[in-house]
Amino acid sequence: PEDVHDDAMGTYLAEILEHTAADTSGAVADYIPQLRAVDPGLHALAVTTADGVSHSAGDDGHQFTIQSISKAFVYAMAVDDLGLDQVITAVGMEPSGEAFNEMSLEGGTGRPLNPMINAGAIAVHPLLDGSEHDPMAGGREHHTRTEAVRRRTARIVEGLSCFAGRELTVDFASADSEYDSAHRNLAIAHMLRIHEIITGEPAEAVRGYLDQCSVLVTVKDIALMAATLANNGVNPVTLERACSQEAARLTLSVMATCGMYDASGRWLARIGIPAKSGVSGGIIGVLPGQVGIASFAPRLDGAGNSVQGVEMFEKLSSEMGMHLMSNE
Ligand code: GLN
């Protein structure tokens, strides 16, 4: 495995960053105090091939909270732990066409439409079993969380770390500040409880889900996580299996149709790469068998996707011929 900086690919990525930096439209997410404080001029781009060669440019050492990008990986973990038949009773796989934080539940079943929106991720999170995990793994100071929440968070951090090939940590201060005003996510969790999609305490589901969203990553981490999906679930650097081939395929399918929220159709038509974005400004894209791509730039468009990140992917996809629906 290589981590290359002074190379043609690195220079090319730096050029893309320079080009996209000109667009300062959009705004950083302001509903989470930690995100409001970010320097909006930060930007980074990384690619990791499915056989583990990495290139990156820009602020590639900057750590940010993973936010909704975690949803893709935790879905893969749930599919492996419980099997798709069980997971599908809790969450569907149809695009919602609505905002990421919409109370979007299917009529009749009360299931969230897909795991890439908040409702779906809050339904998936408590499916994971943390009972074998150390409740002290995140540190002793997190006494505001129940033991069940701490165990599940430990389970999820372990799983995400396997995808990333290093031990990730949680920014608990960010999670706490988000929890203090998480009324919408709590409302979603209570709706899920009413429909018996979740059976435990709604507040515990949201607590754990926000810890999951607050795992700290760099653009290089999420490029390798994406490359692990591209490599059928095996981390190409550590050679550890992070999820099954089936879970990777299902996750990529759901990313393709639902990963960019209500801009998913437009994204697939214009860029043609299964992807997942997060409100802190990250986007991952995966070309199966080929490459994982990750961008970071904090200003978001109306759908909650990074403005410059979308432009970076657009440029990469068209210049490198990455559109999956095209046969150039
Ligand atoms: N923690 C965020 C929330 O639940 C994640 C949303 C996102 O990244 N789009 O609102």
Image (spheres, grey):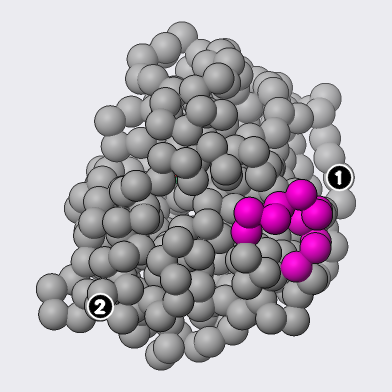
In which image quadrant can residue 327 be found? bottom left
- Please provide the residue range marked out in magenta: 135-145
Residue bearing the label numbered 1: 2
Dots 2, 1 in contact, CB < 8 A: no
Q: Nearer the viewer, mark 2 or mark 1?
A: 2
Considering only vertical position in the picture, is 247 above or below 186?
below
Q: Position of residue 214 (x, y in %)?
A: 60, 46
Q: Quadrant of residue 324?
A: bottom left
Which residue corresponds to mark 2? 195
Given residues 265 and 222, the one toward you in this image is 222
Within 8 Å: ligand 1 and the Cβ of disc 2?
no
Give the side of residue 306 with respect to residue 297, left or right. left
What residue sits 20% from the left and 80% below the top? Answer: 109
Query: For the residues marked 2 and 1, what is the alpha-carbon distance in whole angstroms?
Result: 49 Å
Q: Is residue 266 visible?
A: yes
The stretch drawn in magenta includes residue 310:
no
**94 in relation to 67, above or below:** below
Within 10 angstroms of label 1, few (less than 14), some, or many (20 or more) residues?
few
- Give the amino acid at mark 2: His
* Residue at position x 58%, y 16% in the image: 39
Pick the front one: 40 or 13: 40
Of the two numbered discs 2 and 1 on the same chain, state the one appearing first in sequence: 1
